[in-house]
């Protein structure tokens, strides 16, 4: 399962709350493969925002674990909705304002530049956007000289990408990564925008993408970091006030993050799926909830200690 880039869904109208779940026990780390015995429970995560006083929160909680081997953060049991639309419901009509279809001229520019450097780029190289959403990334990559394909699981998003953004229907498949197929070694550049953290089995998804990648191709992935400073501070606060909760991941509420990753998660997964991390970057991103006068020092510290919110990795086959 995957969803479209979150950046395309902002401002996101929250989907309807999920009603029914299947809770699946996790047996091993989905990235490095070690047993769940080789992880520790860090706390509980409610199916809603926990705020400063989670004891007042009402809801269902799952255990959050941190893999001792690769530091992946995940939950066990893993909540899987009966209906995909419980999580990724189609936004109401008022979501489709004109601004939703606007593409900033710098959209995805840094990622394309980095990919071109790593690829020794030539015009006409083939690219694939996993979770294409409204097709903005496909357009940016196409303008940059790639021949772009994509796929998207939401019927509505795919329709809008074709009708309004002008994406060719032959270039944009409908489906989830588990169902979509391409010939082996089809693409030079494959991008998972804000996708991998939503998938039930991220290791399998990367394995499938690797099979579609040409020998010297590059995969780009952006995910939430499990070493984000702000989460660590909130967790310390929860401990200090004596509650057994953590703020990591959001398996049963928006934005439905099932995982947080470290660089080591990819290094270890690369040993299983035959790839190497050839470049990586931590990005500070949002400093929401931090007073403005503290932003410079937080930015400096997070940049220095690789404790920003987002981790970006670029992978090549080994
Ligand atoms: Zn692991």
Image: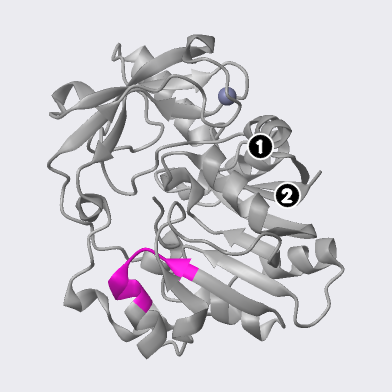
Does the magenta segment cover residue 198? Answer: no
As displayed, is residue 294 above or below residue 32? below
Q: Quadrant of ligand 1?
A: top right
In this picture, residue 257 sits left or right of residue 265: left
Vertical placement of residue 207 versus 235, above or below: below
Q: Secondary structure at mark 1?
A: helix
Q: Secondary structure at mark 2?
A: strand
Is residue 164 among what the camera can see?
Answer: no
Where is residue 265? Give x, y as percent: 62, 32
Instruction: Name the one closer to the observer, 280 or 104.
Output: 280
Where residue 211 appears, as percent x and y from the top left, is 66, 52
The residue most toward the front is: 183
Checking the image for residue 266, the label placed there is 1
Relative to the observer, which residue lies in front, 92 or 2?
A: 2
Magenta run includes residue 152: yes
Give the CA distance from mark 1 to mark 2: 9 Å
- Check if mark 1's residue and mark 2's residue have beta carbons within 8 Å: yes
The residue drawn where x is 71% and y is 34% is: 267
Q: Quadrant of the C terminus?
A: top right
Left or right: residue 267 versus residue 237 is right
Q: Which residue is mark 2?
A: 315
Q: Which residue is most to the right?
A: 120
Q: Earlier in the sequence, mark 1 or mark 2?
A: 1
Q: Position of residue 36 (x, y in %)?
A: 47, 15
Question: At 34% from the left edge and 45% from the top edge, which residue is drawn?
Answer: 256
- Which class describes the residues within 10 Å of circle 2: few (<14), some (14-19), or many (20+)? many
The span picked out in magenta is 151-158
- Looking at the image, residue 132 sits to the left or right of residue 127; the answer is left
- Mark 1 Cα shell of 10 Å, populated few (<14), some (14-19), many (≥20): many
> For the residue with label 1, is its CB less than 8 Å from the closest atom of ligand 1?
no
The residue depicted at 54 percent of the width and 11 percent of the height is 38
Can residue 307 be seen in this snapshot? yes
């Amino acid at each position: 399962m995957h969803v479209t880039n979150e950046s395309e869904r902002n401002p996101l109208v929250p989907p309807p709350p999920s009603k029914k779940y299947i809770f699946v026990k996790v047996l091993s780390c989905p990235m490095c493969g070690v047993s769940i015995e080789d992880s520790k429970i860090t706390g509980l995560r409610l199916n809603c925002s926990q705020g400063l006083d989670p004891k007042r929160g009402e809801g269902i909680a799952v255990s959050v674990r941190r893999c001792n081997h690769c530091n992946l953060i995940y939950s066990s049991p893993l909540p899987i909705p009966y209906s995909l639309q419980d999580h990724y419901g189609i936004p109401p009509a008022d979501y489709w304002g004109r601004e939703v279809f606007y593409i900033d001229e710098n959209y995805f520019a840094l990622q394309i530049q980095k990919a071109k450097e790593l690829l020794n780029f030539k015009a006409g190289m083939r690219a694939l956007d996993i979770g294409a959403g409204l097709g903005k990334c496909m357009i940016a990559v196409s303008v940059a000289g790639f021949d772009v394909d994509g796929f998207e699981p939401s019927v509505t998003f795919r329709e809008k990408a074709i009708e309004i953004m002008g994406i060719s229907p032959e270039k944009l498949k409908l489906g989830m990564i588990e169902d979509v197929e391409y010939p082996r070694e089809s693409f030079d550049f494959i991008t998972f925008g804000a996708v991998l953290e939503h998938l039930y089995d991220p290791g399998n998804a990367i394995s499938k993408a690797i099979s579609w990648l040409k020998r010297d191709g590059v995969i780009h992935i952006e995910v939430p970091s499990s070493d984000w400073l702000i989460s660590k501070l909130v967790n310390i606060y929860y401990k200090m006030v004596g509650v057994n909760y953590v703020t990591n991941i959001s398996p049963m509420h928006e934005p439905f993050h099932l995982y947080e990753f470290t660089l080591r998660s990819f290094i270890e997964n690369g040993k299983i799926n035959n790839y190497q991390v050839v470049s990586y970057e931590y990005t500070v991103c949002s400093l929401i909830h931090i007073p403005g006068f503290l932003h410079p020092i937080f930015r400096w510290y997070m940049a220095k200690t690789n404790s920003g919110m987002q981790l970006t990795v670029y992978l090549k086959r080994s």
